[in-house]
Image (cartoon, rainbow, N blue to C red):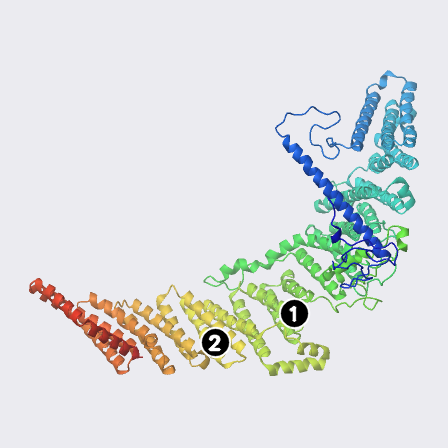
Amino acid sequence: MESQPSDRPAPPGDGPSRPWEPGGASRCPDCGAELGERPPARCLSCRLPLRGDVAARLWRVEQGLAAVEERRGQLLAQREELLVALRALRYAPDPAPVPGAGSVWAGPQGGRQAEVSGRSAQTALLVLGGALVVVAALVFTVVSWGHLGIGGRAAVLFALTGCALAAPLPLRRRGLAATAETCATIGLVLVLLDCYAMRAGGLAGAGAVGAPGYWAACTALVAAGSAVYGGATRMRAPLVAGFLLGRLPALLAVHAVGLGGLLGNATALAATTAADYGVLRWASARDGLRGRLRLDGLLPPAGAIAALWGLAGGALAVEASLVAVVRRTAAAVDGGTMAPVWAWLPLGVLALVALAVARPYPGPGIPGLTVGARGLAAAVAGAAVLAAAGGPLGALLPADWCAVGYMVPAALLAVGAGAALSPRGARPSGGPGAGTPGVVPTGLFRAAGLVLLAGSFLPLTRLVPALFEPLAHLAAAWTAPAPAAPAWAWKVPAAGLTGYWLLIGTLAALRALDAEVLRPVRPEQSVQSVQSEHPEHPEQSAKPELPVQPAKSERPGAPGATARPEGPPAWTDPVLAVAAVPGLALLPVAFGLPYGAAAGTAAALAVAAAGCAVLRPARPAGPAALVVAAALALLWALADRPATILVLALGAVLATALTVTLASTRISARISAWITARNPAAGAARATTAGGLRADVTAVCAVLALGGEAVAAGATAGLALPDIVLALLAVAVGSAPVAARISPRQVSRAVEGTGYLLAAVACTLTAGHPERLALVLTVAGVAGLGVALRADRRRAATVTAVVLLIAASWLRLALWDVRTPEAYSLTVASAALVLGVLRRRRDAGANSWAAYGPGLVLGLAPSLVAVWADGHWLRPLLLGGAAALVTVLGVRHRLQGPLLLGGAVLLLVGVHELAPTVVQVLGLVPRWVPLAAVGLLLLALGATYEQRLRDARRLRAALGRLG
């Protein structure tokens, strides 16, 4: 396919003086504008330069693209031709196979893709061959050993071992590295078989040495020799084998000296981990050795294995210590009752190694470790120290205090780590580890926090039931006759309370230190920590580093430090206050004081918290402590009637005082002036802070406390439930005038709404006592009428009061077994008519149907229904008179609703009264008379149809003019 030269720019000259196209039309390579026969030096449209070296290079690129497009077109055309030829041969016989060609579509290479690479196949063969050789050597050593003499045995084994260890050298020179690694591995296995053969044959007195000691020495020598051999030959397999064999000497050695228990194995594992740390630290710090032996791929797995070995040793030491602490018997574990003390050795070694790993490089740390790995190592070090320190303490304390023994050092470590992370303990910028000064303290703090939480779980599970112990005696306290005093014993586990206070004390200390661990970790801090790590290789240190902003955890005032929020986080004060209240309230119980002392302490804490909330509204600790203390005081007081009355009375007084203080601007101003005179900073903070307490909330609490006080006093006096409800209703009714007298409006609404809630509760509680319910509804209705005297409550209160009074009257009529419908309907109808009259007075244009229709229907409809079922003459007479009066009033005042409703009812009453006579008359006349009368009526209507239509229109217009 040919390209389109008119769509592409023409070639510029090779020099800077030649134009974009020496001849012919062309286009700008950027905007596509026409350049003409003689293109200018710049495009007239987009000002793109068209001359120079850069323009020439652009032209060559354009030419290359044109050639590619041309070649692509040719290939596409050839592909289409081949496809057409193949489609024509779809149903032709299969052609004879061509030698060297694939029988199926095989892709670009013309053959099936190999499932296994050559490297993998070679490795599989080498591994399989090496394994077979090792098995053969093992069989020869174990089974065929007795067929040769001492000379033959030694000669065969040493000859095979020497050959296997010497073969890798020429193999590596020939480039057969994998084969050399396999031969070296076989040689190391043969060395171990040689060691076995020496002991089995008793050569050089090897049979007289104990098996653990002998193999400890053998594995140590073989491991060291493998490492040296691998380093000398630059092979990785001997290095790996030597490292793995290095796991065994220490374990075998402790078994050789008779210390093969938990602590002995733990010490051996810890010692091996320490040796691994030294080796890995030495190898990681030498770049030449790492490159020559290709250790970059071996060091991370080796480090992971060493870490697992150390963790296993620490787990064994912790297990031995915990078993000795929990079981308290000398035979429980090796080391007897001194096992927690002996556990110091492996745990101390593990802590030192982990702490060294957590340090930054070029310090004692290992190069290449991430911040997360270092933090994990620091956490392991902290956990090891805590396990070592907590074991002896737990063994010295009673059995119930074991967890406290571990929590004490955890609390000390948490406070120490928090001090290191506080602004006063932060390391200034610069020096080793700058940018991540908190990695080690943060890891230690996390370990301490985890131990604190784990250790406090069991004590807290025993403390929570004691906290809610009074609820278990709630039913017994409020059954008649009331007990003179609580007859139950209240006990609090001292260990649980001590653990709880350790948690609170730790948090309080961290809050006082303003530790950075109390603040959430921001993503930018993590990024800065990673960026500030030192380079692993010396040559990288010469590269310019990007400027890194210092983390906010650095000491304030340091060069380049960013602004840090002053003071501890806002959440610490409320959490401390909420946590401290139960601990303080349970102290009297822990010291053996009676029940009343605990309830009184909780109430006193509520009063103190209320004072703190008023005097220091800028701190949210006061309101939080007030809520918890008040809830605890009420919860505990419910187990005793006198205590309940006292606590509710105190709560009502306290809530009322808080409401008055918070709602009165004069009192608030005096308190602010008093605080400012003693502490200007606190006074300024109080003046600019809205505070945590709200007057409307305290007002609600005051009304609820008064209602609860009324109920508790009535129950204590021995009153029945209906009588107790009257006391509750009295509080609800009394809240209405109080709400009308107080301000601001928000507090008034809170008091009024709470009173309505208490009234609803009173009505609900008397649902099973109809007579008392009628009285309660009546009192509530009368109170509603009193509320209706307020201008802003007149309409809603009036409607509510009328509904309540009507409900009370209906309930009373039902109790008197009154079945006359007018007794129920006339009250509702009268109320509806009064409301209609008031509405028409307020709005003269209101429709009479909306104003009087509901009342008239409620008053007339039930009686009309009863008329048709009543054969007495009095009800029709009264109903007819009432309907006639309504009709006359509708005509008199020109009201459509009363006129039509009254007329309709009057007509139906008349039909009811005349119906018997009409039926009697129809029975006396001949049967053709009604038919004739109907026919004559229809004839008259037809003759006067137009006149009747005009009369109907005039009647409709007249009715429409009515109100």
Question: In the figure, 734 relative to 477: above or below?
Answer: below
Mark 1 is surrounded, within 10 Å at the Cα level, by few (under 14), some (14 to 19) or many (20 or more) other residues, namely many
- Residue wearing tag 1: 620
- Residue wearing tag 2: 735
Question: In the figure, 127 relative to 429: above or below?
Answer: above
Which quarter of the figure is the C terminus placed in? bottom left
Drawn side of residue 291 relative to residue 492, left or right: right
Q: How many marks?
A: 2
Badge 1 amino acid: Pro
Which quarter of the figure is the N terminus placed in? top right
Q: CA distance from mark 2 to mark 1?
A: 30 Å
Choose top left, top right, bottom left or bottom right for residue 720.
Answer: bottom left
Residue 782 has which mark? none
* Furthest residue toward top: 147
The x and y percentages for residue 38 are 80, 59
The disc, 2 or 1, on the residue closer to the chain's N-terminal end is 1
Q: What SS does tag 2 mark? A: helix
Q: What SS does tag 1 mark? A: loop
Marks 2, 1: nearer the viewer: 1
Q: Is residue 60 visible?
A: yes
Drawn side of residue 427 relative to residue 770, left or right: right
User: Toward the viewer: 338 or 276?
Assistant: 276
The x and y percentages for residue 196 are 85, 26
Mark 2 is surrounded, within 10 Å at the Cα level, by few (under 14), some (14 to 19) or many (20 or more) other residues, namely many
Q: Is residue 405 visible?
A: no
The x and y percentages for residue 513 are 76, 65
Badge 2 amino acid: Ser
The x and y percentages for residue 831 are 33, 76
